[in-house]
Each structure stands twice: as structure tokens, then as C-alpha cells.
């Protein structure tokens, strides 16, 4: 199935809006728990949730599990974190052939079970973005009229302390005693994009609806909105302001930028993307960097980065870099031509561009006094600072005394660097520490300007490795050739919401050095497509 794009502006505003998601941090062993009573019918149920999964490393990320053996998860076989697997204990086991490796988009996943169906393949339906999956590497269906562990009496968990889900969940429904079509929870809009809609049916005895909207307390995040009062208990989830705040406004109807493991530098075990891709950790005494899932070219935007600097040897940096090859080992914000950054230690911050130091400010830098960037692409100005200060004493709201200037409408990508440190990014999906300057916005779908056409061709620098570069093209390719060779998605490269990720070491697709690519796009095409709900990526 092709990947569709969403229109901006009125097309988004007119639809059903999902306000909040909950971030589940695997490093915190975050999960939700509830003890089910006697079910309406534990042979028949439907589970529906939107999820932005963010982990390409952990091979087993449970989304929902019953009291005894069983789960629905991302990953769960042979070290592959990118499949979807449903297991209900015993002989029931379905593993998708399709791969789900886009970490920038929200997927809608539905599990519909009815073991009373005469045909085995009709007893389980797994849907992703409105489409029923039919290709499985393992397809062991439940026996006729088999009772299910899922929806049985006992304690169920959303994520769980071991093999936890790392990412964002929103608009989560469970319907006890009914098997429902995908259209009960979503629909294709006029542009052919699968979007959420309000569910209007009943829920059954164990049914629930989690909006994750009430952040007045941890317990309130688990309140059931179905009318059943089947509330869930969040564990290791935080609503305390700061870097671990887990009540997010990053949803399928207003998607935010995150850090991007597909396009960042991962130099080994010391480097790690975590906390649902809002933290870049580098334990090595060398520079390493992580870029964002989006580049920007027009408008005014603001973002922050926080780190617990304990000594002058620990450094964090925040800034912008031009598009091109993957971030290289040893690169830091402001070290390459055309990039701009501010490097902060325990003593303050120094500006850099093209590897040359610029202005500086002194003062404490910590988790509670983050680094910050305000950038005006229309005027070609960027301000970098920490706490309440801007390097050079500029005023972004007034447009005066920028830290650096550049050619207006240059396309740049936010990124973060660390030297023996862990840096937490905030693009606006949780509250900013400081109020953005007047006119400057968070980096999310609703704040993006109407997009230009994506790039139809270009070059990238290959590495002759199966973990090839991420190539930002400002859209999702329908077809792709590399060096004149037709790409099979899922084999030679993956589609992502902003371009493609090379997955082949073959010289025809990823020679060490210059590679040429040509893409075509469906209609409508958009530029900043990172923010859109995406149908499943697949091995066709």
C-alpha cells in the first residue's frame, strides 16, 4: 500500500482532534496496569490504539499484555523490533512480514479477535492505518471457540516493566464482546490519509477508553472515558515539570519533531537515543550528535535542550545544520560549514559556526536552565542562548542582534550534540521551560507552513553498509531508483515520512561515495511530511 500525505491547514483543523498522548519511557520501566473482571466475552474483543514507536534496538516492545502468557507488541522475534506480533499463549501466534520502521509517524494499530469464526484466518485481524495485514511470517490462529488470555479476568498491562514499549500512545480503546472494523475508529480523509474519528459504540464489561488528557496527577492520566470507570494505574510515569514530564501533546493530529536515530550518528554502545527519542545520550569522551526528524525552511521556530552538566569536561550543544550526509563521528553543533551551534559547559555557552568560536555568555547551565534556539528562516537569523540570555544580547522578538545570520529560506535541521553527557530535546511536545519569543513556534504539524514540492532527485554519500544513510527529501517517495537501480522498499531502502533510509550494502544502492537517486511521488505531495500519519511500511 502506498504512503499517503495529509493536507495542511483547514484539512487538519476540520477533523477529529486528539489532544494528548502519554509518553512511556522504557528506561524508567513505565507502564499502566488494570485488573479486569469477568469479561462480556473473552472469545471476542477489539483493541485499538495510535502509537508512535521510537525504538529500533529493543526487539520486544509490548503494547498490551494479559494476566498470563500473551501480548501484542512491536518486535518479539529473532531480534527484529520492527514487526508486529500477536501471541495469546499456546499455539496462537501471528508475526507480520511487514516492517514498521518509521519512527517519525503515528501508526494506528487494531487487534480484532473473534474465535467463534469458522475460518481460522477470520479469527484474528490486525490492521495498520485502516488496512488489514495479510502477510505473516508466522500465522498460527487460535482454535475455534478458544477462550483468550487477553480479556480474561486478572491484571493486564499497557507496556510492562520488562520488555516495555518506548514511545507515545494516544486514543486507546478496548471493546469487550465485539469485533469491530477499522472504520469504527478511523477513516480516510479527502487526501487518502487514514485519520482518527470518534468512536460512538459501546464498550462491554472490561472495555475502556484512555484519552491521557488529565495531567493533574499521575493517576488522572489513566482515567477511563468510556463511562465504565475502568481506570488504569500509571507506574513510573511523571507529570512533574521537566525533562521526564510524560503528558505530551504529540499526537496523530498534531505530530511533533523528535530526535531521529535514522539520521543521527551512532558511534557504538556509548551513544543511545532513548526516552521516546527525546534524549540523546553519549557516554564517550568524544563528540556525537543526533538530528531531528524534520528540517525547516520557512517560518519562525523555537526549541530547547537540557542537560545536567556536572563538570567542564561535560559539554552539550544545540543548533542547526544544513542537510546532506548523515551526521559524522566527531561532529558537534556548529562544527561544519553552514551549521550554527552553542556549546554549553558548567561555566556558560560559546557560539560556533563552521568550527570557529563566536560570542559567549557565562552563567550556570543545568536541566532547569536549558539551552535554546530561536530561528527566523524568512529573515535568515538565528539566536542561541541559555536560561534567560541570548549570546550577543539579541532580541528574537524584535529581530535584532542575532547570534548568526544566513541566507533566508535555507533549509536547516535542528540537532543536538553531547560530549560525555546526556541531552534532552524539547520541540514543544511538553511545556517549554521558557516562554518562546513572540512569534516563534513549536516544531509540529499545526505550525508548519504549506509545503513546497519534495525533492525529486539528488545525491547522497553512501557507506557501503546495510545500515546506510538517512536521506531527507521533504516527502515520501512512491517509487525510487538509486544509481539507476529500482529500489524494493523494505529490502534496499525504507520509506520514512521525510524521505528514505538506505538498508543495503550492495554497490548498486550504497557505494562508498556518491550515489544518485531519483524519486516519484503520489498526489498530493508535501514537503514537511514527517508529521503525517503513515500507512504501514512493508516488504512488498
Image (cartoon, grey):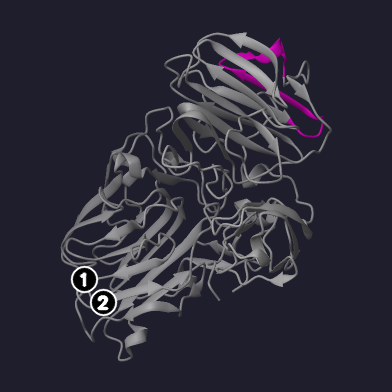
* Residue 41 falls in image quadrant: bottom left
Q: Residue at x 34, y 80 (%)?
A: 139
Residue located at (63% from left, 22% from top): 342
Mark 1 highlights which residue? 89
- Between 278 and 201, the one nearer to me in the picture: 278
Instruction: Residue 450: give x, y in percent of width and height.
Output: 75, 49
Which residue in the structure is indicated by mark 2? 92
Q: Nearer the viewer, residue 492 or 193?
A: 492
Give how far apart the Cα atoms at labels 1 and 2 are: 6 Å
Which label number is shown at residue 50?
A: none
Q: Nearer the viewer, residue 340 or 244?
A: 340
Question: Left or right of 265: which side holds 6?
Answer: right
- Residue 389 part of the magenta-drawn span: yes
Point out residue 185 in the picture as x, y percentages from the top left corner.
47, 66
- Above/below status of 180 relative to 311: below
Mark 1 and mark 2 in contact? Answer it, CB < 8 Å. yes
The residue at the point 65 percent across, 64 percent down is 507
The answer to whether residue 225 of the structure is visible from this angle is: yes
Task: For the N terminus, give its image quadrant.
Answer: bottom right
Mark 1 Cα-neighbour bin, 10 Å: few <14, some 14–19, many ≥20: some
Q: Which residues are magenta?
A: 376-395
Mark 2 surroundings: few (<14), some (14-19) or many (≥20) residues within 10 A: some
Q: Secondary structure at mark 1?
A: loop
Image coordinates for residue 22, horizontal then vertical, percent: 41, 45
Residue located at (51% from left, 59% from top): 101
The quadrant in which the C terminus is found is bottom right
Amino acid at each position: 500500500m502506498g504512503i499517503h500525505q495529509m493536507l495542511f491547514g483547514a484539512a487538519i483543523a476540520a477533523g477529529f482532534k486528539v489532544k494528548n498522548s502519554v509518553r512511556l519511557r522504557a528506561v524508567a520501566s513505565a507502564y499502566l496496569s488494570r485488573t479486569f473482571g469477568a469479561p462480556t466475552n473473552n472469545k471476542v474483543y477489539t483493541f485499538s490504539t495510535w502509537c508512535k514507536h521510537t525504538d529500533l534496538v529493543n526487539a520486544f516492545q509490548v503494547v498490551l499484555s494479559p494476566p498470563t502468557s500473551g501480548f501484542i507488541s512491536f518486535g518479539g522475534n529473532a531480534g527484529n523490533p520492527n514487526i508486529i506480533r500477536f501471541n495469546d499463549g499456546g499455539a496462537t501466534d501471528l508475526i507480520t512480514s511487514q516492517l514498521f520502521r518509521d519512527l517519525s509517524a503515528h501508526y494506528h494499530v487494531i487487534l480484532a479477535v473473534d474465535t467463534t469464526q469458522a475460518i481460522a484466518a477470520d479469527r484474528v485481524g490486525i490492521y495498520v492505518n485502516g488496512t488489514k495485514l495479510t502477510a505473516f511470517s508466522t500465522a498460527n490462529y487460535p482454535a475455534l471457540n478458544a477462550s483468550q488470555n487477553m480479556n480474561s479476568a486478572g491484571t493486564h498491562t499497557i507496556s510492562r516493566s520488562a520488555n516495555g514499549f518506548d514511545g507515545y500512545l494516544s486514543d486507546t480503546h478496548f471493546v469487550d464482546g465485539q469485533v469491530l472494523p477499522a472504520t469504527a475508529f478511523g477513516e480516510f480523509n479527502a487526501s487518502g490519509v487514514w485519520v482518527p474519528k470518534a468512536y460512538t459504540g459501546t464498550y462491554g464489561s472490561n472495555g475502556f477508553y484512555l484519552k491521557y488528557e488529565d495531567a493533574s496527577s499521575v493517576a488522572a492520566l489513566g482515567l477511563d472515558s468510556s463511562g465504565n470507570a475502568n481506570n488504569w494505574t500509571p507506574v513510573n510515569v511523571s507529570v512533574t515539570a521537566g525533562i521526564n514530564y510524560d503528558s505530551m501533546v504529540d499526537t496523530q493530529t498534531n505530530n511533533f519533531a523528535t530526535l531521529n536515530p535514522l539520521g543521527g550518528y551512532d558511534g557504538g554502545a556509548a551513544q543511545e537515543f532513548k526516552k521516546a527519542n527525546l534524549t540523546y545520550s553519549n557516554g564517550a569522551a568524544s563528540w556525537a550528535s543526533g538530528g531531528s526528524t524534520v528540517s525547516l525552511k520557512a517560518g519562525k521556530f523555537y526549541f530547547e535542550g537540557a542537560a545536567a552538566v556536572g563538570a567542564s569536561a561535560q559539554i552539550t550543544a544545540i543548533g542547526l545544520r544544513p542537510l546532506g550526509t548523515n551526521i559524522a563521528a566527531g561532529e558537534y553543533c556548529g562544527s561544519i560549514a553552514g551549521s550554527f551551534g552553542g556549546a554549553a559547559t558548567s561555566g556558560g555557552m560559546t557560539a560556533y559556526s563552521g568550527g570557529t568560536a563566536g560570542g559567549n555568555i557565562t552563567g550556570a547551565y543545568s536541566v532547569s536552565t536549558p539551552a535554546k534556539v530561536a530561528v527566523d528562516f524568512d529573515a535568515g537569523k538565528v539566536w542561541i542562548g541559555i536560561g534567560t540570555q541570548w549570546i550577543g544580547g539579541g532580541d528574537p522578538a524584535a529581530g535584532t542582534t542575532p547570534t548568526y545570520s544566513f541566507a533566508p529560506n535555507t533549509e536547516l535541521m535542528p540537532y543536538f550534540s553531547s560530549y560525555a553527557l546526556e541531552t534532552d530535546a524539547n520541540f514543544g511536545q511538553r511545556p517549554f521551560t521558557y516562554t518562546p519569543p513572540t512569534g516563534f513556534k513549536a516544531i509540529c504539524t499545526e505550525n508548519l507552513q504549506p509545503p513546497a514540492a519534495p525533492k525529486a532527485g539528488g545525491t547522497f554519500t553512501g557507506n557501503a553498509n546495510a545500515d546506510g544513510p538517512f536521506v531527507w527529501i521533504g516527502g515520501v517517495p512512491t517509487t525510487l531508483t538509486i544509481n539507476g537501480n529500482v529500489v524494493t522498499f523494505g529490502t534496499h531502502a525504507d520509506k520514512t515520512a521525510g524521505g528514505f533510509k538506505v538498508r543495503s550494502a550492495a554497490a548498486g544502492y550504497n557505494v562508498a561515495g556518491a550515489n544518485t537517486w531519483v524519486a516519484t511521488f503520489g498526489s498530493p505531495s508535501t514537503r514537511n511530511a514527517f508529521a503525517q500519519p503513515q500507512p504501514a511500511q512493508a516488504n512488498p
